[in-house]
Amino acid sequence: MFVCQSGRVINGDGVLLAAARHLKSAGKLKGNRVVATSMSNLGLERILAREGIELGVQRSAIVMCSRKCCVATTYWEASSPAM
């Protein structure tokens, strides 16, 4: 999340969109695909699709261990094979 110079808050979906556009224009967006969490909204998916970028959805379950470190178990959902 960022706040721009005018005070407008840019949420995570906005950051992903800006990064995806930049990487695609530079020819560095591998497979024209972006991975986001299941919390990203349909608007992001639609605008990415309109720009020829696929959105893969990642679901993570965070498990706390006794040493206070995190272990993430990841589940992928996408129309194409996992990256």
Image (cartoon, grey):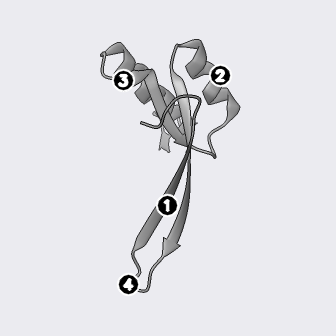
Residue 41: percent from the left, percent from the top? Answer: 67, 36
Q: Which residue has dot 4 on it?
A: 67
SS state under label 2: helix
Q: Residue 29 carries which label?
A: 3
**Mark toward the start of the polypeptide (4 vs 2):** 2
Other-residue count near label 2 (Cα within 10 Å), few / some / many at <14 / 14–19 / ≥20: some
Mark 1 to mark 4 CA distance (whole Å): 17 Å
Residue where numbered disc 2 is placed: 46
- Residue placed most toward the observer, 42 or 77: 77
Q: What residue type is labelled 2?
A: Arg
Q: Residue at x 63, y 46 (%)?
A: 39
Q: Which of marks 2 and 1 is nearer the N terminus?
A: 2
Q: Using the rendered image of the protein, determine whether residue 60 is visible from the camera's viewpoint.
A: yes
Label 4 and label 3: CA atoms lie apart by 36 Å
N-term mark: 2 or 3? 3
- At a point 52% along the width and 14% down the height, the residue shown is 52
The residue at 50%/28% (across/down) is 17
The reply to whether dot 1 and dot 4 touch (C-beta < 8 Å) is: no
Spatial CA distance of label 2 from label 1 is 27 Å
Q: Distance between the residues labelled 4 and 2?
A: 41 Å
Question: How far across and down, in percent of the image, does residue 74 sit?
Answer: 50, 54
Q: Which of marks 4 and 3 is nearer the N terminus?
A: 3
Q: Residue 38 carries which label?
A: none
Residue 6 in view, yes or no: no
Per the rendering, the mark at residue 73 is 1
Where is 40 relative to 64, above or below? above
Crowd rating for badge 1 (residues with CA inside 10 Å; few <14, some 14–19, many 20+): few
